[in-house]
């Protein structure tokens, strides 16, 4: 299989995105551009799709403040009512490479959303839902193969009656690789201050929250695994020299879980609120990366915050190492330190034209890493040699 795993990705009508198409995207990719060019909107659109797949259209709209906060104001009113998403992706399933195509259209999502969905395994339709009150389930999916499960109803399909009109029919395929991938899109905008705070006993330790404010609870779960504990400490020692140990502890007075650190040359442990924001931020990113699901997409905004350029280089190496088809990690940045650590094919250039977000892969200029070796990818980007818009 090629180094990329997403063959085609399309998003239309979301904030500054009018119509955005990306081709041949790798598991580890970085979207670099100036503030306000639409990098966050791109990640928000992917998160919006995941919220819809998990909890329905009303929950997705509510999380983003309603229709008025998501539609593209650059579109005419008659065309601004429809959100479109399309993905063509190759995923591993029990050792086999399987190719899925999922097409979503939400029409009239300002008032009464009408949902159209299609799902294909290669060219075989698994699902067709054409603005109906229930999805028409065409095929069943097992171990990389589609099997006909019924010959009845419209289009020779099984009519799944009573299916909630506001929910994604991918719920019927939640155990498939494509279902898992779209359900598990995780967007991280880490808040270092809240990440330092001890967690109450009712904090969910299963998944790190978007802001990282349940870090202590998640770390407490992970450190029970000796392998995970060793990897986290090894990478933290590489990124933040001087760290000797990281532990969690249940506090006696309030039963909250706190993170405790120990540095080389010291005897006593000290709490998270005494370490730098960069240290906590790096720890949050490590947990997010190491705890990524089998199928999913981890989105990280500005991984460079509070970190030394050398630490950023080590962090990029870590994230690249743990990115894989099916469990991808994408980052957004406007830091030359991050860009400097990249390969040309990993870099996507983001900018705006007439208020509309566009993105292009850096390889589109026909250059190679060898061409840029004397200059450096960061200097090529900062000087606009890659013709992706000025990064400031």
Image (tube, rainbow, N blue to C red):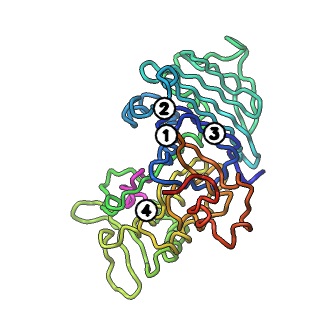
On screen, residue 130 above or below 206: above
| CA distance separating discs 1 and 2 | 7 Å
| CA distance separating discs 4 and 2 | 43 Å
Can residue 231 be seen here? The reply is yes
Residue 167 lies in the magenta-colored region: no
Task: Provide the residue designation for mark 4.
Answer: 219
Q: Residue at x 68, y 34 (%)?
A: 101
Task: Give residue 379's quadrant in the image.
Answer: bottom right
**Could you tell me if the residues under marks 3 and 1 are in contact, i.e. CB atoms within 8 Å?**
no
- Name which of mark 1 and mark 2 comes first in the sequence: 2
Q: Nearer the viewer, mark 3 or mark 4?
A: 3
Task: Provide the residue designation for mark 3.
Answer: 21
Task: Provide the residue designation for mark 2.
Answer: 74
For label 2, the SS is loop
Q: Which mark is residue 93?
A: none
Q: Nearer the viewer, residue 277 or 289?
A: 277
**Could you tell me if the residues under marks 3 and 4 are in contact, i.e. CB atoms within 8 Å?**
no
Q: Relative to 129, is 211 on the left or the right? A: left
- Name which of mark 4 and mark 1 comes first in the sequence: 4
**Could you tell me if the residues under marks 1 and 2 are in contact, i.e. CB atoms within 8 Å?**
yes
- Name which of mark 4 and mark 2 comes first in the sequence: 2
């Amino acid at each position: 299989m090629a180094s990329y795993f997403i063959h085609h990705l399309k998003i239309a009508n979301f904030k500054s995105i009018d119509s955005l198409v990306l081709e041949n995207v790798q598991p580890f990719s970085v979207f670099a551009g100036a503030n306000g060019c639409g990098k966050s909107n791109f990640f928000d659109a992917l998160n919006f799709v995941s919220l819809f797949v998990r909890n329905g259209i009303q929950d997705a709209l509510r999380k983003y403040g309603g229709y008025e906060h998501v539609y593209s104001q650059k579109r005419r009113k008659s065309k601004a009512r429809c959100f479109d998403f399309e993905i063509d992706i190759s995923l591993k399933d029990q050792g086999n490479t399987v190719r899925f195509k999922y097409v979503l259209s939400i029409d009239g999502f300002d008032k009464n959303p009408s949902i159209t969905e299609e799902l294909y395994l290669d060219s075989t339709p698994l699902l067709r839902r054409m603005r109906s009150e229930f999805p028409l389930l065409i095929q069943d999916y097992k171990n990389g193969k589609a099997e006909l499960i019924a010959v009845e109803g419209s289009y020779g399909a099984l009519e799944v009656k009573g299916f909630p009109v506001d929910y994604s029919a991918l719920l019927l395929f939640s155990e498939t690789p494509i279902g898992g991938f779209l359900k598990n899109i995780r967007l991280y905008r880490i808040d270092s201050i809240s990440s330092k705070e001890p967690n109450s006993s009712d904090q969910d330790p299963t998944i790190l929250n978007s802001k990282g404010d349940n870090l202590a609870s998640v770390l407490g779960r992970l450190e029970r695994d000796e392998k995970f504990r060793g990897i986290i400490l090894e990478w933290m020692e590489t990124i933040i020299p001087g760290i000797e140990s990281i532990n969690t502890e249940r506090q006696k007075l309030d039963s909250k879980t706190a993170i405790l650190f120990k540095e080389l040359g010291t005897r006593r442990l000290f709490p998270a609120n005494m370490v730098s924001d960069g240290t906590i931020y790096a720890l949050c990113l490590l947990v997010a990366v190491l705890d990524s699901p089998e199928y999913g997409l981890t989105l990280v905004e500005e991984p460079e915050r509070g970190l030394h350029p050398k630490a950023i280089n080590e962090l990029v190496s870590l994230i690249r190492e743990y990115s894989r088809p099916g469990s991808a990690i994408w980052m957004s940045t406007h830091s030359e330190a991050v860009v400097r650590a990249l390969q040309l094919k990993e870099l996507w250039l983001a900018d705006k034209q007439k208020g509309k977000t566009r993105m292009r892969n850096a390889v589109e200029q026909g250059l190679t890493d060898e061409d840029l070796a004397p200059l450096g990818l960061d200097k090529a980007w900062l000087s606009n040699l890659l013709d992706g818009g000025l990064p400031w």
